[in-house]
Every structure is written in C-alpha cells, then in structure tokens.
Image: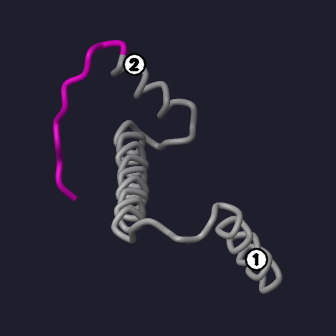
Amino acid sequence: MATMNISLPDPMKAWVEDQAKDGRYSNSSDYVRDLIRRDQIKAEKIANMQRLIDEGRASGISDRTPRQIFEEAKAEFERRKGAA
C-alpha cells in the first residue's frame, strides 16, 4: 500500500482523529480511505446518470404523448414488480 502525506488545518485534523476515536474506524487512515471510496462511488453514479442523460438526448424527440410514455413506464414497473 502506498503512503501519502496530507496537510490539514488543526480543526480538520481534530475532526478526522475524533472519527477514528469513536470506534467506527480503526485509525485516521481508515476514515480517509472511506471518504475516498464514498467519493468514488458518488462520481461513478454521477457519470452513469450523465451517460443516461446523454443517451436520452441523443435518442431524439418521441412521437408518443406524455400519457403514453407514462402508461408504458407504469406497465414496465408492474411487469418488473410481478417478476420479483
């Protein structure tokens, strides 16, 4: 595992150390690793949402009415709910 040194203002350093002291994390490094993992997951979710938005925009304008789209989505939901 690689080592990285970071500088934090005193209040932030105290916060990180307090998170480790409460027992959820074994040390400050575990807390920082968890923050990074959470940020990675968040970035992946944002990238996925952006991909879906881009696909939707690239698909063009539908000739279906909003009601038709809603009914199709509702039917798909019911189908998936029944399959679960």
Number of other residues with Cα within 10 Å of mark 1, as a class: few under 14, some 14 to 19, many 20 or more: few
Residue at position x 42%, y 50% from top? 42
What is the quadrant of the C terminus in the image?
bottom right
- Residue 64 screen position, x and y as percent: 59, 70
Q: Which residues are magenta?
A: 1-11
Considering only vertical position in the picture, is 37 above or below 52? above
Q: Which mark is residue 62?
A: none
> What kind of residue is marked 1?
Ala
Alpha carbon separation for disc pair 1 and 2: 53 Å
Residue at position x 68%, y 70% from top? 68
- Residue 81 screen position, x and y as percent: 79, 77
- Which of the two marks, 1 or 2, is nearer to us in this view? 1
Instruction: Please tell me which residue lies in front, 51 or 61.
Output: 61
Q: Is residue 47 left or right of residue 61?
A: left
Identify the residue under disc 2.
Answer: 14
- Residue 35 screen position, x and y as percent: 40, 42
Q: Which mark is residue 75?
A: 1
